[in-house]
Structure formats: structure tokens, C-alpha cells
Image (spheres, rainbow, N blue to C red):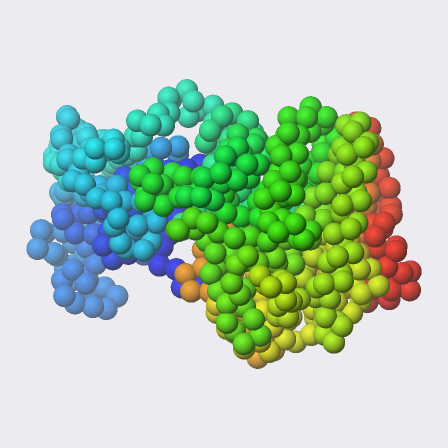
Amino acid sequence: MADAAVHLDTACAWRGATLLVTTPRGDCGPDDPLTGFYVREVRHLRLLRFEINGEPPWMCEWSRSRADELSYVFVHPELAHFGGGGSGASGDEVTYDARGLPHRSIDVRLLYGVTLDRLEATVHLANRARAPITFDAGWVFAADYADLLEANEDRRQQEAPASARVEGEAVSIRYGHDRLAFQTRVAGSGPGRATVAQDRWTCTVELRPRDTVVLRLVVEGRDPDRPLEESERGARMDLHDRWKESLAQIAVPGNPEAERLLRRAQDDLASFPQLEGQKDEWLALQAGVPLYPAFFGRDALTAGWQAGMLDSGAMLDAALSRLGRLQTDRVFEWRDEEPGRIPYQVRTGPLARLEKNPYSAYYADFASPLTYVIALGNLFAWTGDRERLDRHWETARRILEWARTYGDRDGDGYLEYLTKSPMGTKNQGWKDSGDAIVYDDGSPVPAPIATCEIQGYWYTAQQLMAGLAWVKGDRVWARELWRAARALKARFNRDFWMEDEGFYGLALDPEKRLVRAITSNVGHCLATGILQRDRLPRVVERMFQADLFSGWGIRTLSTRHAAYNPLSYHLGTVWAVENATICFGLRRFGFEAEAVTVARALFDLAGLYAGGRIPETVGGYARDEHPTPGAYPRSNTPQTWNASALTLCMQAILGLVPFAALHALVVDPALPDWLPAVEVRGLRVGRTKASLRFWRDGDGRSHARVLDKDGPLHVLRQPPPEALRVGLRRRFRSLLAG
């Protein structure tokens, strides 16, 4: 298998809403406009570079053993400092630089560690020469307080001077903007004589042979609008660490590569709680680094339900809490607010605070509110907790009211979106890029648009809410919701079906004409259950034809379409998060072999990339035509909901369905030959923690056994109810092919 690497010229360390972005050489500066030290999307340091005698040392390597740390190894001076080359001096000859330092006499180990609102740098300097040496070492720095969005675009929309003042061995920097009172404090320490200026901290170092000295730098990003006390910082990190330690662990005896990929994905996912807001919101997930260190409603909810088996819904609970507090009760077109909506994204940088964009809380999205209800159903399935259900109930109820009144704009029984904000996003479904929804000739579909997956979300949201309403004792509303869902399903299967294609169309346009594009959106519809059962075999067969299935996953758009582009955001690429949802849907309805095919594709895809991280979205090149799929230009890596994708695939393969309120867990493993055994330890269903083992025998049959449990839990071997209804013959063929 080939190895692939996305073209990203940065390295990242992050914790909560604090982010360090460096070049691979370990510095922040003008060579890459995105680099810098950020707190809540505010760049507190634009320039940060370690120097010896005013020059950067020579990079040997960089690494990241943890999400919140970056490590670098340098030497100084290298031959390049003398204008020469080669690997070293010959014989006993020693070469010196202009300051009298022998060639490669200093080895440098630099560690950057990120905590909340703070960057801590530690550098170890060792003398590898045979004589004493003296040199100056330290950091140069500067602040500009750009918004992360400005940095990414390399275009400022707000700007003011920054003033620096020396205070002992520290430098205090303030932003001069009359509405943005950001401050940065930079303080160094070391054993030698320090020289402090407005843009640098330097220490004179004297080292005997084989001696080592340690220098430190602490940078604090201060935000008067969101102050964080030291005790609060500690409390947030402690809660985060305890939660991380409590996550279920997945082992794969017999396939160490699959286990490595699962562990990497879990470690990444565990690094993404934003640790912001009120205590019950701290575990709400950000969307990814370096481009999306912010709270996106659909991203947090999707990753939360996809990875529910790891933490029994704690991530979901936090996201639901935060979104509930942000639910709007007004009409405000600048942010596309409508009563009952919850936000699509919440940005905290200068542009949002100054209303240069509407993203301080932006609501133009149909996926987030409907996924909220779906997430609540998943949370109750894992916990059976009536108190949590009650806490989020009113938010979910108001979302469905919004969908019925504002979402269905013309009263035709479908949800259609129409953006009102002049700076808003045109498309508000799963695919939110401006050119994502197109006619057969490639021309864009005008709004209002009713995409197919939104109808699927609405269908399953009403079904799940009906079940939850029944639990709460509201039997009248439960029946109303169930009937409404059934009516929607009937309409959908009448109006979106394309008999000649054996597939469903992408959307209805403003004239209610069917947009006949063949897309991955239908995979979401499969997962939600809105598709007519007797059509499922044809839909699945069409989904795996070569124009949609690339070998790495289901493409966003068929290669036969006029607008197909393998490197376009939503017009031909492959999204891991979407394919994980499709894998879940395939398994739900009894297509075990196809579910395993998608899961294997995603595991293989993860194995292509450095660290086992699937980029935000990869290209649509076919697996049998090119060694790698390609990747969307500047794909964000790591991406939160890609980190949850492999976990959902594993849950689908194991057939795990929790019913915590009944103290029950349904399992139905369908292990392929590349997963001979799987062990899940510390799985929580309700208040019970259990460990289970799954294995495949020599005849290809899969088995399950409970290893231990600390409370009441009935583990039942049973396929999903929907799978049985597809047909026993179909299920039997899938099991044989698995």
C-alpha cells in the first residue's frame, strides 16, 4: 500500500480553545500566514522564533507525542551557517562560525506545551564541543491580534497597533483597538544574564563541555471579556483528564494496524473538548485544527453520536447543553435566526465580536437542529437517564416546532432552506459549500432547496421524538409525530424516487422539480430509514457502482455528472464522516457485506496518512486507477468527526445497539477476516460498565461473550430489527460474503 501525505505546511498543538500553529521548522512567522499562537481564535503571537546568536538553529526533526505538545530537535551551528555543505568537517579539523562556536557544538531540544490560554516553552541546550562555549539564546516575538479567519485568508479586516512594555523579565503587549482589549504577557527564565526588549527575551549562556542548561518561556493570552482564573483552568483540565481516562478501550487482537488506527482516532477525539462555557458544556467538541478550533453544532453532535460507545454520550450531553442555551427565540436575518433554531457555528475571534461576519452565533443550517433531536435519542439510548432527557426536552420540542413552521416554508410537507443573511452560506444541508447542489448540466440550483438528506433527518427526528414522548408519557403527541413521520416517508418515496436509476434524487428545486444528480446524500437517507424497504437492494447496488464508490468510499457526486471534480469540496470527493454514517445505515438494514466494505475502505484510507489521520476530505480518484485518492487542497487535519468515523464503523460491525433504560445491549457481530477478534473494555450502558469479546471462528461465524460487568446488563444476540425485515435470504447471503 502507498503512503500519502496531505500538503500541509504547519504543525499544531492544542488544548481547549488554545492553539499553536508552527511551520515544520518550529517557528511562527511570515513564511506561513496561518502560523501563530491563538486563544479563542485570536492570534496573540504572530511571530515566535527561537534563536541562538540571532539565528534560528538547524532543524533536525519535529514530532507530536500528544495533542498539546510539539517537540523539535535542532543543532547549531550547521555547515550552512558557514556557506558550506556536506555532512561535517574531515579528520580532526574543527570549523567555527563567526562567533567562535564549533560546528554542531550545541544540540537543542525544544518543547512547546499548550494549556488553557497559555503556551509554555522549554528548551534544553547541551554543549557537545570539547571546550567551553558562550552564546546568546532566546526568543523573538510579536503580536498582531488577527482573527484566525483573517490569518487563513491572509487578509486583514480589522487592525490596530499593538504596544509592548518591558516589565522586569517579562513583556506586556496590548492591542490598541478601542473594542478589543486583548493582552499578551511573555515571560522568560533561565540561569544566565537575561536581556529583555519589547520584541525579544534573550539569555547569555555559558556551558562547559557536556553541560546542559534549560531556558523557559511562558506566554499568556489574556481576554478581559472572558477571564479565566487559575483555579478554573485547573478544574477544566482535571475534568477533561478524568473523562479521557474513562473512555472505553477497543483492542483488536490479530490486527495491530487496525488497533493503532482506532487508538489514534480515539486520542484525537479525546483532545477536542473545547473546555469553554459553563461546566456542563466543557466537553462539547470543537470541529478540528488548525482551521476549525470553534464550536460547530452539527460537527459536535455528529462526532458525539458516532463515538457514543466510547463515553456513553458525555460529549453529546455537553453539546446539547451548550446548544440549548444558544437556541434563539427571535427572527434576525443577519444571523439567519428563527425561533427554535440552534447555531451552525459559534466563532469567537475579532471578526465575530466586531460583527464583521454573523458567526458569533450563526444559525443557517438544517442539519444541526434535526441532528440535535437525533443526538438526544442516542444519549437516552446509551444512558437511560430521564433527568438528562428532561433537561434537553424543551429545546428538542422547539426545534420540531421550528421545522414545522419555519422549515417548511411553503407548507408542502418538505423542509426547504433559504438563506437571508447577506454574508450567510447558501446551502444549509449536509453539503454546505456554495456549489454543492447542482442540476444535471452543472448549473447551481437556486434556493429555496429541499435536499433529500434533510427530509431523512426530519423523518428520523420525528420518529425518535415520538419514542421519547412515549417514554415521557405524552402518548398523544407521540402518535402525532409517528403519523407525521410516516406521511413524510410516503411523500418522499413518491417524489424523490428515480425508477430509471434505481436511486433517489438529490433535491427538489424552487419549482418542486427533482434534481436528478446521483450523490452520497442518499446514503444519509438510508441511515435514517426514510427509504422504501423494497427499494433498498437496488439503492445499495447503485451506490456501489464504480461512478459512486471509488474504492476509498462513496463519492459525494457521481463521476458521470457534468460537475464532477475529484478535488472539489462536495462535487466528487470522499468524506470519511459521511461514509461512516453510510456504513451504519448499511448494517442497520442488513447489508453486512457492504457495510464491511465501507469500513475496510476507511481503515485502509486512514492507514495511508501520517499518524493515521484521514484528512477533512479526500479526492475521488478511483482506487484501481491511482495509488491514493488525492486530497482536497488544504484539507483540515485532524478533523473531529473523522476521528469518530472509525469508532462508528466498529460499532456497526459489532452490531452494538444500547437500550440503557431496559438495562440491555443488543449485539450482532459480523467480523470480517481482517478483524479476527475485537475486545471492548469499559463500555458503559446506563450505570453499568462491561467488557466484551467478539471473535470469528474458523468457519467465518462471529461470536460474542461478556468478560465482566459491574451492574445489571442483559446482552442479547440479535440482528437489528430492520435487518430482519429486509429478508432472511438477503441477510444469509451477506453473512456468507462477510
Residue 506 vs residue 255, the one in the foreground = 506
Q: Quadrant of the N terminus?
A: bottom right
Q: Is residue 249 visible?
A: no
In the visual, does 505 lie left or right of 333? right
Extreme residue in the left direction: 98
- Residue found at x 72% / y 47%: 460
Which residue extends farthest top? Answer: 231
What residue do we see at 86% from left, 59% from top?
A: 726
User: Quick one: quadrant of the C terminus?
Assistant: bottom right
Q: Which residue: 79% across, 43% down?
A: 482
Image position, residue 642 (x, y; %): 56, 53
Residue 69 in which image quadrant: top left
Q: Using the image as rendered, state which of residue 503 and residue 581 is in the foreground.
A: 503
Instruction: Find residue 529 and report its horizontal and vertical position in percent.
Output: 76, 53
Please give the name of the residue rendered at 15% of the width and 35% of the height, measured from the top-left corner.
Answer: 163
Which one is nearer the viewer's eye here, 335 or 678?
Answer: 335
In the rendered structure, the answer to whether residue 429 lies left or right of residue 662 reads: left
Q: Position of residue 582 (x, y in %)?
A: 68, 58
Taking depth in this image into account, of 622 and 145 the one nearest to the observer is: 145
Q: Is residue 140 visible?
A: yes
Decide if residue 647 is on the left or right side of residue 194.
right
Q: Is residue 706 left or right of residue 257?
A: right
Image quadrant in which you'd find residue 496? bottom right
Q: Position of residue 55 (x, y in %)?
A: 16, 52
Decide: is 714 above or below 30: above
